[in-house]
Image: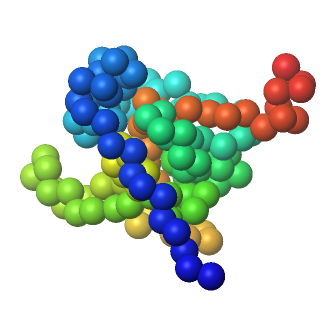
Amino acid sequence: MQDIKKPKVKKSNEEWRQELSDYEYQITREAATEAPFTGEYTNTKTTGTYVCRCCGEPLFSSDTKYDSGSGWPSFYEPVDYENVETKVDRSLFMVRTEAMCSNCDAHLGHVFPDGPMPTGQRWCINSASLKLQASAKETDSE
């Protein structure tokens, strides 16, 4: 059976600006970075799936979230590596690996090779790039 790749979400800057707050737009469409320890999901312990704020693509599970001490939500792997893309980021006089949503090209954050096992990766993600879909169990207990 042949893999059918879904088309990317393509919107104009004006359309994105209508759907996102100014802050969310800066983070996701202009590759800005939240100040550390300020994001909505930095210390969240709620179980569920973190999806792309822009398009709803499933990105990370709370099962892979951990406290890296960096000040940003950190995960040791995405839900599916096909849902994220990476590229070399040479901004700010350093070389890093930028993480983006593969469905809409939203800037998510960066990936570093200093995470825990089993992957050794630290996906350091801006809260403004994410929405948390709480698990049914978590929702029932609230």
Residue 56 visible to the viewer: yes
Q: How is the image coloured?
A: rainbow
The answer to which quarter of the image holds residue 34 is top left
- List x then y, in percent, for residue 128: 43, 30
Identity of the residue drawn at 24% across and 24% down: 14
- List x then y, in percent, for residue 23: 32, 21
Toward the left, the furthest residue is 93
Q: Is residue 3 left or right of residue 15?
A: right
Identity of the residue drawn at 52% across and 25% down: 40
Number of on-image labels: 0
- List x then y, in percent, for residue 75: 55, 52
Q: Is residue 1 left or right of residue 10?
A: right
Identity of the residue drawn at 20% across and 57% down: 89
Toward the bottom, the furthest residue is 1
* Quadrant that contains the N terminus: bottom right
Residue 33 visible to the viewer: no
The answer to which quarter of the image holds residue 114 is bottom left
Q: Is residue 112 left or right of residue 68?
A: left
Is residue 23 depicted above or below 127 in this figure? above
- List x then y, in percent, for residue 29: 28, 36
Is residue 131 depicted above or below 63 in this figure? above
Identity of the residue drawn at 47% across and 39% down: 55
* Quadrant that contains the C terminus: top right
